[in-house]
Image: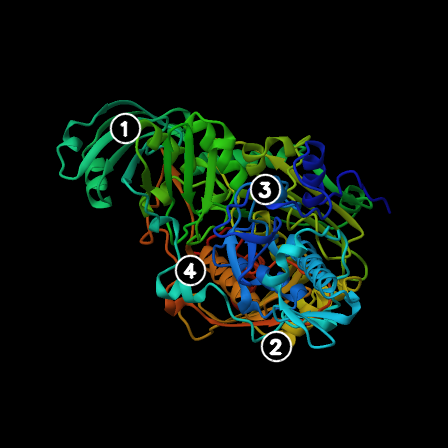
Amino acid sequence: MKNNSVKNISRRHFIQQGAAATGAFVLGMHLPTIGNAAIASKSESALANAWVRITSDNQITLICARSEMGQDTYTSMPALLAEELNLPLSMIKVEMAGVAPVYINAMLGGQITGGSTSIREGFDKLRTAGAATRMVLVQAAANRWNVSPDQCAAMNGKVTHVSGKSATYGELAADAAKLPLPEKPALKSPANFMVIGKETMRRLDTPAKISGKAIYGIDVKIPGMAIASLAQCPVIGGTPSSVDSSAALKISGVIKVVQISDGVAVLAKDFYAARKGRDALQITWNEGPGANLNNVEIRKQLEAGLTKKGAIIKTVGDPNGAVASGKVISAQYFLPYLAHSTMEPVNCSADVSNGKCRVIGPIQFQQGAQAVAAAAAGVKPEDVTIETTFLGGGFGRKLELDFIRQAAEISRAAGMPVKMLWTKEDDITHDFYRPMSVHKMEATIGADGQLNALKAKMVSQSVTTRAFPGFVKDGFDPFMTEGSNNLTYGIPNLEITNVIEDVGIRVGYWRSVSNALNAFAVESFIDEVALAAGKDPVAFRMAELKKQPRALAVLKLAVEKSGYRAGSKKFGVAQMECYDTYSTCVVELDGSAPKTKVKKITFVSDCGITVHPDQARAQLTGGILYGLGAALSNEITIQNGRVQQSNFNNYPTLRQNQVPIIEVHLVPSQEKPGGLGEVGVPLVAPALTNAIAAATGKRIRDLPIRS
């Protein structure tokens, strides 16, 4: 058996190597001073580094470098710090970090929130920060009392000596700040965790969110700020060639009209006036090369890409020989463009004045935001401050930088601070869409009735080619391999190929990225192969997972919890590893419904050490619902370069009567933490179509399901 290790490389390793080559991220566990980290302190700090600030009044703050978009960074990340500082979680305050190299996500090569990496990347880093801080606090107390540090213990915000002497962390902070931080302090064993993994943990941001005190991008207010509504070309990429703003300027409340590189903005005292003014603009558009794009031709171009050689990502054994000598089972799968459709539409506030630029908004990529705002404002990057608000949903959309550039351009052109607000229609029609993709699958079955060979080819646009072109080498986009390069099945002859086909639509990272694309093709096809082998789909998978104990255990538990029965015509199953988490999804159909209706979804995950169990289940549930809605009804279609969908009426979210019973079970594990925020999405579609095939004999290979 041969293994092509040249292409058998994870996207994480690929990006880390690329980032390291350019000096893009910090290696090791260096805890810089507050000055080095460019943290804006709201009060006099007695002790501060990149991650922790302790003031003399014993207020302890985590400087959080990951955006909060509902996925729990404002609780689970403070929990890591609280654990090693021996604090109740309620004692930790949270402050969003500014832009600094120390906050670069080592798994992604930038100061980015995405890829289900926040806990995976921060698990050791933040615990180390907490442990190092605890050690210098204890040493400061020992020095003050002239005793051995071994006679002192830090707990609940105090350091106490065996004699009964005690001092708060705040009282010791100034002395502790003078001591060198240990770079490799001993971390707690999971057996000694007091905070991490406890079912009693509650979210720290809930009070602010339910009281309305939490600040989202749409809530931002700057003195003297105008509200901006931006008219954009109906064809993405088009630009204004002529503008008549006379009617708009006559509308009460309108302040001025400014033209930027890709649109025309109406500034007003409130959004109603700004939107009314925008509707009154007379604009002639240069629609550009995208004006002739349509779905039918795009799909044909992608399908033609199946005949191209592409980049061979992974090879095991002799797949070509095995396929040539056996009876071939083959199938082709299709997935449409999808919008992110966050509840909070795109928005951003900017103030360009006096050679400085201030940007406030829902941002997933702070470094990129700083760079693009600097270019738009005509200032140096160091003269741009980035303030990240809560995000009313991200799903990858707010990794993009278009709205940040637009806000900065508008403020610069208008000479005043602005808050730019898109409508929902703007959001749906001017997204960076999940790529359309086609997949060709081929397999042969061995004498033992199991998979002898599998060849998988995916054709789609490459988001990374647009967003981070330096990471794409020889046709290899590390993000396109998610869900295919990490198959859990023990297939002796395997070939994974990707073909990048640029069709002219702007595409972006969508929740779970290519895991959802590849999982639909792979897990649907595994069911088809099982049927061809005359085997039950679950039994077939179990035989293929003998060398994957975590995946096998998850599948077995899902079968038990769901009530799955071999031969039943109402169940569908799918399993995979996604972002270091092993999961199985079992869909049970409602046999009494006239149309496709899901009765129950059972989802089981082994995500390693679970920091916040209740939120883990919530994240998986949210992902399941997101994936179910996409599978049932979501699709972006394009005619004459124009997106045909515009709001929830024709790009619907799930209605309450469509939501099934959902049971999420977590497998107790001491493995390193896996991702969660995106993990629930990919398996729902193949599990559902597998259930439909079992119930009706009809195999659905194109999404959405439409029935």
Which numbered disc flags the more N-terminal residue, 3 or 1?
A: 3
Q: Nearer the viewer, residue 300 or 128?
A: 128
Give the CA distance from mark 2 to mark 4: 27 Å
Which numbered disc flags the more N-terminal residue, 1 or 4?
A: 1
Which numbered disc flags the more N-terminal residue, 1 or 2?
A: 1
* Disc 3 and disc 4 in contact, CB within 8 angstroms: no
The location of residue 311, given as percent across then percent down, is 69, 35
Question: In the image, is residue 45 above or below residue 618?
Answer: above
The residue shown at (63%, 45%) is 33
Question: In the image, is residue 95 above or below residue 294?
Answer: below
Mark 2 is surrounded, within 10 Å at the Cα level, by few (under 14), some (14 to 19) or many (20 or more) other residues, namely some
Report the amino acid beneath label 3: Gly
Report the amino acid beneath label 2: Lys
Callout in the foreground (3, 4): 3
Report the amino acid beneath label 4: Ser
In this figure, which residue is indicated by the disc labeled 4?
707
The location of residue 290, given as percent across then percent down, is 41, 29
